[in-house]
Amino acid sequence: MKPPAFDYLRAESVGDVLEGLAQRGGDARVLAGGQSLMAMLNMRLAKPKLLIDIMRIRELRQIERKGDAVVIGAGVRQADLLAWPDLAETLPLVALALPWVGHMQTRSRGTICGSLAHADPSAEMPLALVALGGEVLLRNTRRRRRVVAKDFFAGMMLTARADDELIEGISLPVVKGARVAFREVARRHGDFAIVACAAMKIPTGVRLAVGGVADVPTASDWPQLEGSALDDALNTFAYELGARDDVHASARYRRDLVRMIGRDLIGEVLQ
Amino acid sequence: MTRLKAEQRHAVRFTLNGKPVEGEAEPRMLLSDFLRHQLGATGTHVGCEHGVCGACTIVVDGMLTRSCLSLAVQVDGCELKTVEGLAPSADRLGVLQQALRRNHALQCGFCTAGILMSLDHYLAKNPAPTEAEIRDLLSGHICRCTGYTPIIRAALDAAAELASSSKETSDA
Ligand SMILES: Cc1cc2nc3c(=O)[nH]c(=O)nc-3n(C[C@@H](O)[C@H](O)[C@H](O)COP(=O)(O)OP(=O)(O)OC[C@H]3O[C@@H](n4cnc5c(N)ncnc54)[C@H](O)[C@@H]3O)c2cc1C
Ligand code: FES
Ligand code: FES
């Protein structure tokens, strides 16, 4: 199908975007890489009156190291971040997860922040943001605010972003010498995850974050558990995520994957 | 800041395979439709219009792009490359195109334009790809006819031929 009619605004500055959003609120949509939004327009799942194209704004295209964090602007495409020479050293978890986001032909256009704004429950970047405890940098005409990952995702494709706010960027903490692991099961490489897991060693033990099961990516921190104590913890977590049956997989299969992949990844980061 | 009204047609100008082109589009017109219906460049195919099948893949400013997930007005001033730009002349096929033909890498040909664009773009940057890399690249395309194996063979074949021909020129 074809998109419904809308006005198109090619923004040249962040001010242009914020003004457009302030004027039209819920009737306006930011157009970033278009890899989710354009499909939704073609299917008429979204019918905005105004599209605000942010991809010609140079100041949003920065990847910056700021102290113990990396700040990624709204105009940074997934392929740009993958090609960033410091990625593996500063954000090893993102380096592992990003190649799983769609295909080379969609990463070339899709942005990091667009994936977070879209908030698909199986998407890899929201999972990485939650696992790392990153922050989303929001801005409207009146104020700027930062929202931590676990408060940002409010439900399936729902976030804490207000209609008049632009995600200006995100901030991801750089954890020195972090031990991380990532694994995903999907129908084909590049399809949305049936289950995706990220594990990270933390000072008090280990963190496991899971995407594709609950409505939002969910992290849980545990002390260093072993044997049956670890099995029990994984089993409880798998049930707490409230898996549902859908066309891709049964709830039971999803719980199984959480237990199996979780155990493997925790073993990997703690060894 | 440029604001284009929904109900009006707006001038769109860009470079297509090295030549300047122009036409008119409402903001909602997809780039794939603009290429095919406004410019008559029907080499780019349209399958799903969801970004999934890859038939409409082209190159915009050096980026692989689903033309069904782009608006015509978005590419104003950009440089586009489509399948029509691959052959060295009207009556000759390029190395990659010949390799697909030799390896029976197409039947109906519906997917072929998009696959050619992905492979052409990828091989230019990665002249010595592995089979695994080609498979990963092709995950962004759906072909209902060939089962992919001959496409992979053709890609590796083309890479080898391009490598040896560039070696010859550099030796010369
Ligand atoms: C074939 C295919 C396979 C895919 N597979 C995966 C996958 O496996 N995993 C995955 O995670 N994704 C996948 N995707 C989606 C991914 O490619 C998108 O890039 C991503 O979901 C959205 O990013 P975008 O920049 O394209 O955003 P857009 O599509 O432009 O926007 C998406 C939404 O976010 C909003 N938005 C975007 N940027 C901002 C901002 N800065 N501030 C406020 N709102 C904003 C838009 O208004 C819109 O509502 C796939 C897409 C395709 C076509
Ligand atoms: S028509 Fe564009 S990806 Fe299928
Ligand atoms: S040749 Fe028919 S779909 Fe690929």
Image (cartoon, coloured by chain):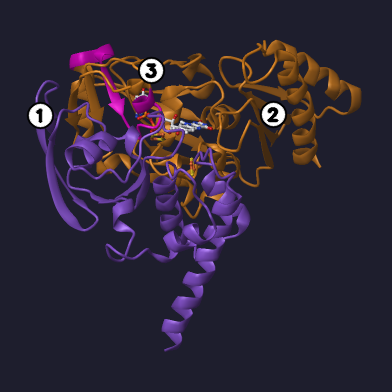
Chain colours: A orange, B purple
Q: Quadrant location of the N terminus of chain B?
A: top left
Per the image, is A240 magenta? no
Question: Which chain's residue wears label 3?
Answer: A
Which badge, 3 or 2, comes first in the chain's sequence?
3
Cα distance, mark 3 to mark 2? 26 Å
Range drawn in magenta:
A23-39
Return the mark for residue A207: 2
Contact between labelled residues 1 and 3, with CB atoms less than 8 Å apart: no
Return the mark for residue B125: none
Contact between labelled residues 2 and 3, with CB atoms less than 8 Å apart: no
Contact between labelled residues 2 and 1, with CB atoms less than 8 Å apart: no
**Camera-side residue of A15 and A82:** A82
Whether label 3 lies within 8 Å of ligand 1 gets the answer yes
**Residue sitting at x 37%, y 21%:** A40
The quadrant where residue B44 appears:
top left
Per the image, is A38 magenta? yes
